[in-house]
């Protein structure tokens, strides 16, 4: 089985730097079966390598391989701990890795949203407690009973 990783090195004016991007992956098996996959979100600054814990054809992976021909639709590809660098390699070692996971994971988002809801409940409770007032008249045990009429 032969695999081809087609990468480009392109300058982007917005970031003012070169970025290397993995464009497609081609897999040739037994010299005849040819499966080609387009790639999503695999890019890094050209002086860095790219690292991702899970890459594959499933929608659950952070970096996806998207089948681009009929043969590729029959393949289920899974790559664990992919690290790739196409340009600016020094001493046959990977450079600093740009990782595919974002800073805010689903667990961090859930914690932040839960904290905000609890903070809102606490603020509302403190606001309601601050609005409490005491009675302006109290029943005197030595004097006549306080009467409150119930009719209009």
Image (cartoon, rainbow, N blue to C red):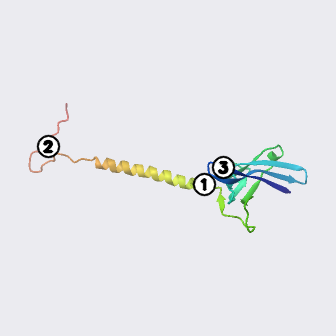
Q: Residue furthest top?
A: 152
| Mark 2 secondary-structure assignment | loop
Q: Which residue is mark 2?
A: 146
Which quarter shows the C terminus?
top left
Residue 133 spot, x, y in % from top left: 24, 47
Q: Earlier in the sequence, mark 3 or mark 2?
A: 3
Q: Earlier in the sequence, mark 3 or mark 1?
A: 3
Which marked residue is nearer to the observer: mark 3 or mark 2?
A: 3
SS under mark 3:
strand
Is residue 68 at least partly visible in the picture?
yes
Name the disc covering residue 63, or none. none
Q: Residues within 10 Å of mark 1 (few under 14, many from 20)?
A: few
Kindly state the secondary structure of the residue where label 1 is placed: loop
Sequence-first tag of 1 and 2: 1
**Left or right, residue 56 beside residue 139:** right
Q: Nearer the viewer, mark 1 or mark 2?
A: 1
Pointer 3: what residue? 12
At horizontal 82% and vertical 56% (from top left) the residue drawn is: 3
- Residues tagged 1 and 2 counted as in contact (Cβ below 8 A): no
Taking depth in this image into account, of 21 and 151 the one nearest to the observer is 21
Q: Which residue is mark 1?
A: 102
Separation of residues labelled 3 and 2 (CA atoms): 82 Å
What residue is drawn where x is 54% and y is 52%?
A: 109
Q: Are marks 3 and 2 in contact (CB under 8 Å)?
A: no
């Amino acid at each position: 089985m032969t695999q081809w990783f087609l990468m480009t090195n392109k300058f982007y004016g917005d970031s003012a730097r070169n970025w290397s991007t993995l464009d497609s992956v081609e897999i040739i098996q037994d010299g005849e079966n040819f499966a080609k996959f387009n790639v999503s979100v695999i890019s890094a600054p050209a002086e860095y390598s790219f690292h991702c814990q899970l890459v594959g054809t499933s929608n659950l992976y952070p970096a996806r391989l998207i089948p681009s021909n009929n043969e590729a639709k029959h393949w289920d590809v899974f790559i664990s701990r992919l690290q790739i660098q196409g340009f600016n390699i020094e001493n046959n070692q990977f450079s600093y890795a740009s990782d595919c996971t974002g800073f805010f994971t689903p667990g961090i988002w859930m914690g932040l949203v839960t904290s905000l809801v609890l903070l809102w409940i606490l603020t509302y409770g403190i606001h309601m407690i601050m609005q409490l007032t005491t009675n302006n008249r109290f029943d005197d045990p030595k004097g006549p009973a306080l009467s409150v009429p119930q009719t209009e």
